[in-house]
Amino acid sequence: MKEKLEQIKAEALKQIENSDALEKLNEIRINYLGKKGELTAVLKSMKDVAPHERPKIGQMVNDTREEIERVLEQHIGQMEKALREAKMKKEVIDVTLPGKKNNVGHRHPNTIALEEVERIFIGMGYEVVEGPEVEKDYYNFEALNIPKDHPARDEQDTFYITEDIVLRTQTSPVQVREMEKGKLPVRMIAPGRVFRSDEVDATHSPSFHQIEGLVVDKNITFADLKGTLAEFAKELFGEDTKVKFRPHHFPFTEPSAEVDVTCFKCGGKGCRFCKGSGWIEILGCGMVHPDVLKRCDIDPDEYSGFAFGVGLERIALLKYEIDDMRLLYENDSRFLKQF
Ligand code: DAH
């Protein structure tokens, strides 16, 4: 019996010594000390032992149990400590490491330019409004003095959805929608996407953006138009910017003009940007045509107004000295990161 106990102990201690995981130690506990374990089996066989030997053998079984338990606990303790230390080592935080840079997105140059234009006009008391991109022929053309046979309607320029629904080719229809509301005076800008059936190149795209402007009130004159747009150009391109109003024609304004600004790059001497002329065209404008006012139920004898249309991409390209419009649409993050 004694030898058997010695043997059990030696075997258990050897297994404990060789085990490398907590689960294994638990298994050993069950195998030796559990209800169906080897030591319990020995206890059960006590009935075969001579009665006077029983206390001694009992004591030996207890000693063996205690010894195995003690060594087990010791190993479990060591193993848990090692695990804890490994975990701490793995999770250690080096507060001296440089921080991770948070990559937030960049605003698109178009967005930056638009916000700048909006800021300027809001500062002058304008409201920002929007109109639909899919537009009735009436608003895009008819109401703006562009009848059915007008060359501006050339199918090459316009995407038709149906015979009388188009993708708007300009933001000017928002003028009509705003005036139709019948709330006067009007002082608004309307930014938005426009569509033309153009081939893509450095200065053209089938989809681009315009910012429409409209003021309607009593006693609005061309002087108001000039003053407003000169102020706008100076705020956008710098105090020294000069503006030039060149006579032009638009069906919905009379008189009409195009506005050039002195080249911000060369100051007017002539350079690559202004193609040697010293001037850069930035928008179209004019006094709202009386027929357009009439169609919106506004009496041209009582009210007058001015309107303008700015190409947003053009402003962004000029402001950031980008020489190819395609860069604005490709969304290459190496390009966008620069703004
Ligand atoms: N809608 C014109 C275009 O797309 C631009 C324009 C010119 C708008 C004169 C206006 C304006 O409001 O008065 O070319």
Image (cartoon, grey):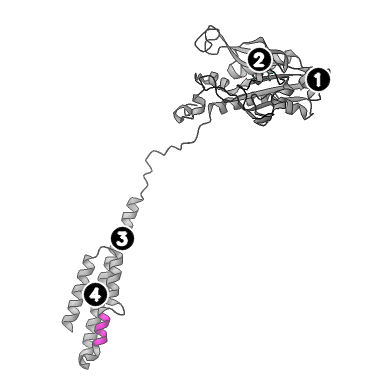
In the picture, residue 47 is in which quadrant? bottom left
Tag 2: amino acid = Ala
Mark closer to the chain start, 2 or 1: 2
Residue 339 vertical placement versus 269 (above, below)? below
Q: Which residues are magenta?
A: 39-45
Q: Nearer the viewer, residue 131 or 71?
A: 131
Mark closer to the chain start, 3 or 2: 3
Q: Residues within 10 Å of mark 4 (few under 14, many from 20)?
A: some
Question: Disc 3 or disc 1, which is closer to the eye?
Answer: 1
Q: Which residue is mark 2?
A: 230
Mark closer to the chain start, 2 or 4: 4
Q: Which mark is residue 253?
A: none
Q: How many marks?
A: 4
Q: Nearer the viewer, residue 195 or 274?
A: 195
Q: Which residue is mark 1?
A: 303
Question: Disc 4 or disc 1, which is closer to the eye?
Answer: 1
In the picture, residue 15 is in which quadrant? bottom left
Q: Residue furthest left?
A: 3
Q: Are marks 3 and 1 in contact (CB under 8 Å)?
A: no
Q: Which residue is mark 4?
A: 67
Tag 3: amino acid = Lys
Q: Which residue is mark 3?
A: 81
